[in-house]
């Protein structure tokens, strides 16, 4: 194992070179991260043991989501407002045409992608994005209006793109997923106080998961439809910043994860009309130190299925249902941007449940790569695909190592 | 970074060789861990950046604790019942003479070490251990009677060793620490149900932290002294398995950490007479999956200062007060035996507090070494010393890398 000592040294040379261009005085909380190599990388992991990480492509910028087309090609959203296509093993240099103007800044921009359940017939691609806000006198850092849109995939571009639903401005990121009921579930996050209280306001869409028809209108069987003082789009409330939204392949339940503050990242199984507690109940602390709430429990508010203390800065999520990693079947994978508020500690996590959906294990994986993982998806080939969150980002694939 | 791919390959060769002697069919949850190399290892870390890990000595067996003598030499307890001395840079092959018979099995055996605050005058070394239980008909796996003893260090051996306090049998591991009040604080752990309820029984010493005089008798100002139905030795109650017990250099407060089940490892600042909740309130799950408690909060029970979900299988703990790592001053370090119930993920954690003792960051460190860390202590040289928990265990030192 004598080689082990050289890795950090190499990392250090890169880090020192990078630091030479910065102010060296102030101690920075994070660890120095070398650029991602070309791979492949081989790691030992729990249950499945040897895996290989292949760098499928570099050249992405802050990708947010990916969707597999039936032909095996892949659409990838980039936060700045570009939709990319990875076709026949190549990331095409020009973005897909047809996207609307996107207001990209901070964690706002082009967000999630989802194909219509009958995509093979109607070719509809759904996406969420932040739209420039037409209202006058908004603050310069206003993130824009979070909007659900769809367009028709013509094989090269999106045609007939139109907005089908707009939420309020000043709300955070968004994920979307089609349920087995044919409805589209859409998350709308919210920041810390003073705005966080909006997550508990039933007349406000921030801090909620919404349930919409595939044309953006409100289904009549929504939990608060027709109830005075409640927005009828709401499916669940009391969320902070949902960054993963997936459908259980087993029973169709909607699984949501959300980014907590310092501590309190969580996975919830959503039940219509329930309140998931933010910011009244939280296991986390504000970044400056104080607890969000002294009591991490309250009658009438749901406890998370899984939560993380310290935070992992949770991101995209998937169930694993394939055959290529038989010992991982039924596991949930989530991306992690960092751990414990220390930059440079991004990785992937695997969560193992028993037959009653009670957690029994959690594995931090790919920690050696120090990559922030924005999204994780299962491919039609039964392999796992990851997007790194960087200015120079990569698409990674996890394969069994023979 | 092309070298990175070779490390796991090397690990794999070792792992495969080890696996060849086992049944290959059953998937094991853990990752394969190669033997610790000879080092040194250089890593980048938060705030302090480049550090070097030096393997000071190998050749230890399941060490539990270490204590620095005023001459800079070091006593190390091994669970099997041996007290070792590391003198003038060498681990002496023969154990220190004078120790009593120890009942070692599972997590029982020779435990913690502490020097009397006036050691330079009285040469007294205190230690805890499991004593063979004289009672007849005990089950074969009974851990013995957890006992506090002391002996006089004559420079080569412990003389005049005598037991000064015995707790009940069937209790878990123990740590000891001398408070600034001159009293000795001693933890007595307890297992999961059906025994866990003993942690809430004020007439039982299991699941408690005790406060004793330096001769093992009970101070009259203990919180429950003279109260009917309460053991007078109790300082705090409702603990699961305390594995770290230290004194704040700033204000003399007793900081305790305890190993939770799956989730729920915690650090508490102990206040006389308070109840820390086990097993009535916990953030963890039993290993099979169910939550320990549906409500992680209850009136009259203390919330932890810091807790971990998932568990890190927390172990020894220290404050860092030295000058060799100026950016780590005031940080707390804890050993971790694994993360998320995945064997092979042992490491060290660093916890950063603000001036109000509110946590603001936590860093997993030394993850690349995959070592279970049983204890961490600050040396008189201002460096950090770690004991790994293995059959072939090592003493490691963390130094700044120039």
Image: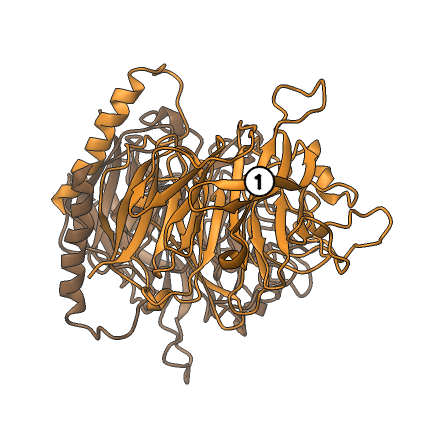
Chain colours: A brown, B orange
Instruction: Judge whether residue A295 can be spotted in this image.
Output: yes
Camera-side residue of A269 and A350: A350
The crowd level at tag 1 (other Cα within 10 Å; few <14, some 14-19, many 20+) is some
Camera-side residue of B193 and B128: B128
Q: Position of residue A173 (x, y in %)?
A: 41, 61
Note whether A42 is above or below B357 in the view shown: above
Mark 1 falls within which chain? B
Q: Position of residue B183 (x, y in %)?
A: 64, 57
* Residue underneath mark 1: B161
Kindly state the secondary structure of the residue where label 1 is placed.
strand
Camera-side residue of B309 and A2: A2
Instruction: Judge whether residue A35 can be spotted in this image.
Output: no
Note whether A280 is above or below B396 in the view shown: below
Look at 12% across and 43% down and name the residue there.
B2
Q: Is residue A34 left or right of residue A277?
A: left
Identity of the residue furthest to the bottom in this view: A137
Q: Quadrant of the N terminus of chain A?
A: top left
């Amino acid at each position: 194992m004598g080689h082990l000592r050289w890795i950090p040294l190499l990392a250090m040379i890169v880090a020192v070179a990078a630091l030479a261009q910065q102010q060296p005085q102030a101690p920075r909380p994070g660890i120095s991260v070398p650029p991602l190599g070309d791979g492949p990388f081989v790691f030992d992991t729990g249950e499945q043991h040897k895996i290989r990480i292949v760098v499928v492509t570099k050249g992405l910028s802050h990708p947010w989501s990916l969707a597999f087309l039936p032909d095996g090609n892949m659409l990838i959203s980039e936060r700045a407002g570009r939709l990319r296509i990875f076709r026949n093993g190549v990331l095409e240099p020009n973005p897909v045409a047809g996207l609307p103007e996107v207001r990209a800044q901070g964690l706002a921009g082009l967000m999630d992608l989802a194909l219509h359940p009958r995509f093979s017939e109607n070719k509809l691609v759904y996406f969420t994005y932040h739209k420039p806000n037409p209202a006058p006198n908004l603050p310069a850092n206003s993130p824009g209006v979070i909007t659900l849109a769809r367009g028709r995939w013509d094989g090269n571009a999106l045609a007939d793109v139109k907005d089908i639903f707009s939420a309020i401005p000043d709300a955070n990121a968004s994920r979307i997923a089609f349920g087995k009921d044919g409805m589209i579930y859409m998350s709308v996050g919210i920041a810390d106080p003073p705005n966080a209280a909006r997550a508990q306001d039933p007349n406000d869409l921030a801090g909620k998961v919404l349930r919409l028809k595939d044309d953006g209108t409100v289904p009549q069987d929504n939990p608060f439809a027709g109830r005075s003082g409640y927005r009828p789009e709401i499916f669940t409330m009391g969320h902070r910043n949902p960054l993963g939204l997936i459908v259980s392949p087993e029973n169709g339940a909607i699984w949501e994860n959300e980014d907590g503050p310092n501590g309190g990242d969580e996975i919830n199984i959503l039940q219509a009309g329930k309140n998931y507690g933010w910011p009244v109940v939280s296991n986390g602390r504000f970044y400056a130190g104080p607890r969000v709430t002294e009591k991490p429990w309250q009658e009438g508010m749901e406890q998370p299925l899984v939560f993380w203390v310290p935070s992992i800065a949770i991101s995209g999520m998937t169930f694993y249902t394939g055959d290529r990693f038989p010992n991982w079947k039924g596991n949930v994978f989530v991306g992690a941007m960092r751990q414990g508020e220390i930059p440079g500690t991004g990785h992937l996590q695997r969560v193992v449940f028993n037959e009653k959906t009670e957690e029994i294990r959690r594995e931090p994986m790919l920690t050696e790569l120090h990559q922030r993982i924005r999204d994780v998806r299962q491919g039609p080939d039964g392999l796992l695909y990851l997007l790194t969150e960087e200015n120079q980002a990569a698409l990674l694939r996890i394969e069994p190592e023979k």
